[in-house]
Image: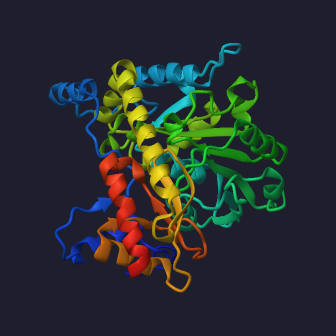
Amino acid sequence: MRLTNRTKNLTASPIAEAHAWLAHRTGDRPLLDLSQAAPNYPTAPAVSARIAEVAHEASGGFYAPPPGLPSLNEAFAVELAQGYSTPTEAVTIAHDQILPTAGCNQAFCVVTSTITEPGDEVIMSVPYYFNHDMWLKLDGVKPVYLDTGADLLPDANVARDLITERTRALVLVSPGNPTGVTIPPELIHDFFDLAQEHDLALILDETYRNFRETTDPPHRLFERADWESTLIGLHSFSKDLAIPGYRVGAVVAGRDVIYEIMKLVDCVQISAPRISQEAVVAGLQHGLDWRAEQVERILSNLQIFRSVMAEEPGGFTLASSGAFFGWVRHPFVDLPTADVVKRLVLDHDVLVIPGTAFTPTDERWLRMSYANLDPDQLVELGRRLEVAGRDL
């Protein structure tokens, strides 16, 4: 048996690697876990109740229709229209422009596999989401890295110089994972125009759309009659409804694109699990007030996190923050970031993800997912970082 070098030469998930150090902890102090951005709080009662109902229904274990449960597609179309409309311009998204997937990661995989072939190129801004980078390499596609400035925002004019005859897509993540930075609508529009000019896809991952610090529309591309020719939106219900283990996300795209993507989904998983889709329907119909409460709580924690990091405890400097994330530069010039992560968890009981998972080089970055800590833990984080700055 011969294994492909595309997997053998690829670094494993940084989440798994970071968690592996937990087995070597010897202290009994509570761990401050800033490694994962998945919600650690229970889902809405209405969602839990519906999950239990579906499990006992005769059809609860059946396949869902390949295009998705009609009730989910219709409910999500309504929610999207509300989120992207303005007081002066209402948008409409059709149910058949939506395809549920087994999580947003699967959405990215099936989308890029639909529009690329081995040897093609996809441009994505740095820092990138590590699973995007991993999948492109596994699929034989070359990631082309778009450097961002001090504000961590991508520039369409810089991206223009990276386009070649092999380029097939531009990828944006907003709010960013790992930076938390929300890309302003006008910049997203610039990338749409650039993609359209070169017959490329603009893949826009909006997993953390509802955790922004504004309720204004993330962009106004759906007002354009031609959005289907260029835009592919990726969405996640894992964070919105605190059901990451149920693995359900969605692609929003033109009908012809959805048709092609469905061929891949059919080979991989047939359809997103029925029980997961039913959970989302319950959340969209009965859990939006609950979601708003969670967003408000997390945004309150964000202000505490920013206040703690404003003191630059131990020399750790916050470069950006938002959604679930803080993008932090550590102060140790001569110490590899992987070693900093190891020492933080073993000596200071703080678990973070190295920035090397999100960048092609080691530039002393750390991703801190502040959202799963409570206010007292965020204050304690500052104390531990202060000590770590002296000890490491």
What number of labels is visible?
0
Q: Is residue 369 visible?
A: yes
* 21 relative to 117, above or below: below
Q: Is residue 3 visible?
A: no
From the viewer's side, name the closer residue of 316 and 261: 316
| Residue that appears at 81% across and 58% down | 158
Residue 70 point in image, percent of width and height: 43, 21
Q: Quadrant of the N terminus?
A: bottom left
| Residue that appears at 31% across and 72% down | 348
Residue 261 point in image, percent of width and height: 55, 42
Residue 307 point in image, percent of width and height: 48, 50
| Residue that appears at 60% across and 72% down | 360
From the viewer's side, name the closer residue of 347 and 56: 347
* 246 relative to 330, above or below: above
* 206 relative to 71, above or below: below
From the viewer's side, name the closer residue of 117 and 253: 253
* 380 relative to 106, above or below: below
From the viewer's side, name the closer residue of 369 and 315: 315
Which quadrant of the view contains residue 345? bottom left
Is residue 104 left or right of 247 when viewed as pictured?
right
Q: Quadrant of the C terminus?
A: bottom left
